[in-house]
Structure formats: C-alpha cells, structure tokens
Amino acid sequence: MKRRDILKGISILPLGGAVSVLPFTARASSKARKRDLYKELGVRTFINAAGTYTFMTGSLMHDYVIDAIESSWQEFCLLDELQDKVGQKIAAMVHSEAAVITAGAFSGLTLGLAGVLTGTDVEKVKQLPFLEGTGMKSEVICQNAHKIDYNHALTNTGCKMVYVDTVEDVEKAVNEKTALMHFLNIEADKGKIGHEEWVALGKKYNVPTSNDIAADVPPVSNLTRFNDMGFDFVVVSGGKAIRGPQSAGLLMGKKKIIDGARLHMPPRGYNIGRGMKVNKEEIVGMYVALEHFMTADHDAEFKVWEEQIATIENAVKPVNGVSTKVFVPKLGNITPTLEVSWDKSVIKLTSKELLEKLRNGTPSIEVMPREENSINITVWVMKRGQEKIVAKKLKEALT
C-alpha cells in the first residue's frame, strides 16, 4: 500500500473506537504458546539419550535464555552496538581481546579466517572468496589428523588447505601464502603436534593460529584455556552444552582479527558472510546462556549426570547377555557416557534394530549406535526424570 492509502484508511476509522488499532506487542497471541505445533505438524519429538547433535536440534535452551530472548524481541536496537556491548562482556569472561556472536561455530571459522585475510580493508573484504591477484594470502596449514568435512568453513574464504603430519612438514609448508595454522581440539590426541607446540610454531613463523572447539565444552575451562594459551582465534558452538540458541556460536580472539571478521558479518552486505545473520534475540540469548554457563556449579551437575547414568546402567546390567561400561571422553563432551553392548547369540538384535525399537516406542527415544551390537547413551541433555523412562524402555527392548 502507498503511504497516502494508509493515511486515508486511518482517516475513515470510526472515532468511537469500534475498530481498534492495537500496538504490535498487544496483538501477540498468547494462544500461540499453548499450541502443540509439533503435534499439529506431525513432527516426532523424543527423549534425547544420544547427545548434542545438530540433526537432533542440538540441545534445549534453559528458561533464563528464553526469558532473555522474550525480553529483547519487543524493542529495536542497532545490531553493531549490541554486538559491541555483548562482545566486550564476553571477551572479559573468556580471557580474549575481543569476541562476537556468530551463526554457529562453522561460520565463526569462516569469519575468523576472513578477518585474518582482509583485516579492516573494506576493498579486500569485497573481494573474498576470489583471492587470486589480490595479494592476500591463500593457504591454511592443518594436520592430517585434523582433516574433517567442517574444514570447508575455511575454504569458503577462497583459501586452500595444506595438510601436514610433523613439525618438519610445517616448516616446509610455511611460505608467503600461509594465512593460518588451524587446529582441531577434538582430534588433539591423534595428531603429532599438540596445542602448545602448534601455537609456538605459529609464533615462530608469524602465522596466526586457530582452534575449533565446537562441541568441546564441558569442561568450562576450555572457554578460557585456549585463549590463555595464545591461539589467535577460537570458535565454539552456542547451541550445545552452553544451551544458547542452536543457530548461535562464538568467535573469540585477537581484536584485530575480530574487527576484521565483523566487516564480513551483517548488517554489511558486500561480503561472504552476509548469509551468516544473527538476530538481536539470538545475541542476547547466547550472552545470557554463556554468562550462566561460566558461573554454574559444574561439579554438582556432573554428579547428577553420574546418578542418572547409574539409573540406566543398573536397570540393564542384570539382563542376560548384556555388558556395560561407563566412560568419560577425554577431549570433548566430557560427560559420563554409558556403553551398552550385548552378546548377539543371546540377544538377537542389531544396534540398528534396537535403535528402531526405541525410536518407534512411546515415548520415542534416540540413542547413538556404535558397533553392530553396541550403543552409547548420554544423559546431559535429558530433562530430569527421563533417565528412568530410558532405563525402563531400554531394558524392555533388550529383553
């Protein structure tokens, strides 16, 4: 509608108030909150005994995160100002020079490297991912043990990956085109070069270093440890253990890199990161989620997880043919994990068949299959009391 048509429409409204033009916030229907939209849409919901996987929608936000989101949706603000203020608060929490909320850890990698490549030169920002002939660097060194699909986040900038195994390989690979030396925390024990040595090599050759710790909290100390260690930028997912919005993440590191990365983010539109938009509600929600995560009693929480795992283990361990083992991963998702395996000659089930039984049951339950006769179960994204349901249903399925 044209402006004059809108004004004309307003002018003919009855003065007695028979037609009410309510403020936007007053028109928001409370009924929407009461609708079971998953049920309406025919979408299956389930008890998550598997973990914080993106295809399972990560984790559930805490009430205080939802409260923060709801407190911020009714007003406008400038996106850059909000990122500035939140970034300053978060940087102080995580011991980095600067920080910014991103659209997940993957976008954090792309934006971090983009910031390394261009700095705050707007003309260079406009040229990515077309690096040829620009004078910008174009190679990222990474250990073969750290070669994963998510490294595509780095090649999105136009850079190519150069994979190495040893310190000697790094020394041969570094050249005038080297933009970054990238590290993958979850595979730290598989590579031949550890965290500290990787950072030292970067400093020796004046090459920035990065660390992908996407799903590697808890422990909460990882949010400060790698910044203190000297990595130039670090990325982490926001929608996993931190339990912020699933589509949010955190890029933290040296101020000059974050300043450069910000030029590749909305609200600017001349860059490779335009589609990596984070709205004001996600920024505020992520900030509050991180604030609580940094100050939570993680020892007490760990004890609760151990008790929940014990509930499930004690239910299935007596089943004939079943064996159990509780372990804690060393590098990422450091939470109690229950491995349940069984003798196939006694229990005539494959892990896939067991998964389908649990998935198709009431309530539906998701677990993580391992080998043909083994599954893993975690409890840290369950609601309280759901471990009892999982214990009962798993025992029934195995017997």
Image (cartoon, rainbow, N blue to C red):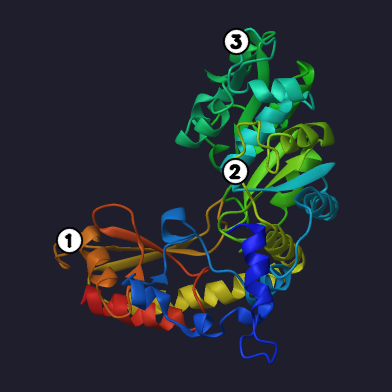
Which label belongs to residue 132?
Answer: 3
- Mark 3 in CB contact with mark 1 (< 8 angstroms): no
* Residue for badge 2: 276
Q: Is residue 240 left or right of residue 393?
A: right
Q: Is residue 201 something that shows in the picture?
A: no
Q: Is residue 263 left or right of residue 341?
A: right
- Mark 2 in CB contact with mark 3 (< 8 angstroms): no
**Residue 315 placed where, x, y %?**
36, 80
Q: Earlier in the sequence, mark 2 or mark 1?
A: 2
For badge 2, the amino acid type reads Met
Which label belongs to residue 344?
Answer: 1
Q: Nearer the viewer, residue 229 or 149?
A: 149
Q: Nearer the viewer, residue 274 or 214?
A: 274
* Vertical order, 174 against 24 (above or below): above
Which label belongs to residue 203?
Answer: none
Gap in angstroms between the C-alphas marked 2 and 1: 47 Å
